[in-house]
Image (cartoon, grey):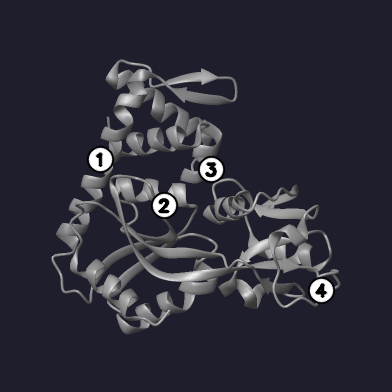
Amino acid sequence: MDLQQLRYFLSVARTGSFVRAAEEENVAQPTLSQQVKRLEAALRVPLFDRLGRGVKLTRFGEALEPRAQEILRQVIETEKLLDGMQEADSGRLTVGVIPTVLPYSMAAPLAEFRVRYPRVELEVREGTTERLIDGLRVGQVDLAILALPIKQPEIVCSELFREPLLVAIPPEHRLAGEAVLALPQLLGEKMLLLREGHCLREDVLTICSRVKVQFERVFESDHLASIFSLVGNGFGVSIVPERARGAAGECRLLPLEPRAVRRIGYAQVRGHHALPVQKRFIEFLRKREW
């Protein structure tokens, strides 16, 4: 049993597919499958039930998963600790950011931090909330910037700022001249959403459910840019973060009534030994005027 095998095992467990896991790990699928089989042989138990195109953890796999996460987290933390008996202004730091925050709210601060602390080896990873939380658990991500709350007992979060959510409608829409919009005014419209796994999608569905408004979902994407393009061309409407305004193109963006916001903050593993560079980055975030 080696660390690479454990990484491949966790990728398959997370994605439910050898093919998707191989894509995430940037390795040939037969290679990944062979390594998982070697892990099963070394442990002398089956870790997955092969179900056609997908897989499911066996009871042995379910028992191994949290232990494998902890092993990888400890190894990565140890590497960073030995490499990082350092000053706060140097060392390695991996920051994960969700896609609806990175280009609109975090790109400039991250660039500023890199300029201010040039000896810090800063790595940025973009991913959905689920993937970033998995990265935190195994130590591949030191700190994640995402939407709150996170209901995971081993994850501790702190809020940085609150961001209004706006309605994006086509420029020639019948309501384009309004100052504010209530969601019931859009009843019957076609709604464009991010795919499942994006926390903004859950925020939007929660808002709609709260006011008991249902929409016809006609398009799902991993990219806000695609949604803005389609809305701007009259394909439907959407609900988007205010800080993405600069990418909205031809869309008309209107505030919601009642006002809707999402909370953005950072997450860490509870009890995690934060190196000086991580504490310096958190201090940097908290001193900013968001």
Q: Mark 1 points at which residue?
A: 70
Q: Name the residue under label 2.
A: 132
Q: Toward the viewer: 285 or 152?
A: 152
Residue 261: x and y, percent?
53, 66
Q: Name the residue under label 3.
A: 23
Q: What element carries label 3?
A: helix
Neighbour tally class for label 2: few under 14, some 14-19, many 20 plus, Cα within 10 Å = many
For the residues carrying marks 3 and 1, which lies nearer the camera in this image?
A: 1
Marks 4 and 1, how far apart at CA = 51 Å
Amino acid type, callout 1: Glu
**Mark 3 or mark 4, which has the lower sequence index?**
3
Is label 3 in contact with label 1 (beta carbons under 8 Å)? no
For residue 92, above or below residue 128: below
Residue 17 visible to an observer of this rendering: yes
Marks 2 and 4, how far apart at CA = 36 Å
Neighbour tally class for label 3: few under 14, some 14-19, many 20 plus, Cα within 10 Å = some
Q: Toward the viewer: 203 or 116?
A: 203
For residue 40, above or below residue 280: above
Amino acid type, callout 4: Pro
Query: Which picture quadrant has residue 100?
Result: bottom right
Marks 3 and 1, how far apart at CA = 23 Å
Residue 246: x and y, percent?
64, 78
